[in-house]
């Protein structure tokens, strides 16, 4: 188990260095505002809420310290469960680092499209009725709820999955996070439209 702790510590040191560089680059990327303040992972996998990878590395580092304490206390079963959770989190962080560039490229495409359509649709969006906007908002909230349920289901499946199946589920989880980010961005946009439509003229 000590070998596992040493290996985890070494991996976390490497991930921390990568996360520091990626987080700094993301903050300088215009498209990141579409992802800003959006959690990278679901609450089923991490307690941390952040759009920065380093925050999740820090959470795993804290759990590794707790694992060391459990080992010294001779609590083998708890230690094994904690170790499995840490390994799942590390795997998720590695996948997020690998996917970061692609996610931001997709965000840039969406940002370009948003800017291109902004003025063309401004007048039309301004005069949408409040009732129609509230209906649209309700539909997006329902879509967000369903995505969260799907994420939770896949996270639970991944805990007991074989390595090959876990990899496939990890890819699905990342894709669902991307869809959830787009959904939440749409919700924010609709809420702003409602504010504009309800302003006294």
Image: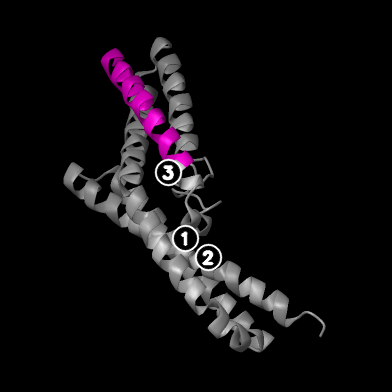
Residue on which disc 3 sits: 45
The image shows residue 73 at horizontal and vertical percentages of 43, 11
Q: Which numbered dot is residue 185? A: 2
Packing grade of label 3 (10 A; few <14, some 14-19, many >=20) is some
Q: Whole-Å distance between the Cαs marked 1 and 3?
A: 17 Å
What span is colored magenta in the figure? 1-24
- Give the camera-side residue of 153 and 97: 97
The image shows residue 200 at horizontal and vertical percentages of 82, 82
Residue contact at pointers 2 and 3, CB within 8 angstroms? no
Q: Is residue 16 magenta?
A: yes
Q: How many marks?
A: 3
Q: Whole-Å distance between the Cαs marked 1 and 2?
A: 6 Å
Residue contact at pointers 1 and 2, CB within 8 angstroms? yes
The image shows residue 45 at horizontal and vertical percentages of 42, 43
The image shows residue 91 at horizontal and vertical percentages of 31, 38
Residue 98 seen anywhere in this rendered image of the structure = yes
Q: Residue furthest top?
A: 72
Q: Which numbered dot is residue 181? A: 1
Name the side, left or right, on which 99 lies relative to 118. Answer: left
């Amino acid at each position: 188990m000590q070998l596992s702790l040493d290996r985890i510590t070494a991996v976390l040191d490497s991930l921390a260095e990568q996360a520091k560089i990626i987080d700094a680059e993301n903050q300088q990327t215009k498209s990141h505002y579409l992802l800003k303040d959006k959690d990278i992972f679901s609450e089923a996998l991490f307690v941390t809420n952040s759009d920065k990878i380093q925050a999740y590395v820090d959470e795993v580092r804290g759990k590794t310290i707790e694992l060391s304490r459990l080992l010294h206390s001779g609590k083998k079963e708890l230690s094994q469960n904690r170790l499995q959770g840490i390994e799942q989190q590390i795997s998720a962080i590695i996948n997020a680092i690998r996917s970061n560039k692609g996610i931001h490229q997709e965000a840039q495409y969406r940002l370009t499209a948003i800017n291109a359509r902004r003025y063309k649709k401004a007048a039309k969006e301004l005069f949408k009725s409040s009732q129609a906007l509230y209906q649209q908002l309700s539909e997006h909230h329902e879509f967000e709820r369903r995505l969260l349920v799907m994420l939770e289901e896949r996270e639970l499946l991944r805990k007991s999955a074989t390595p090959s199946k876990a990899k496939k589920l990890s890819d699905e989880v990342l894709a669902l996070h991307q869809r959830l980010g787009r959904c939440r961005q749409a919700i924010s946009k609709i809420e702003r439209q409602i504010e504009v439509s309800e302003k006294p003229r």
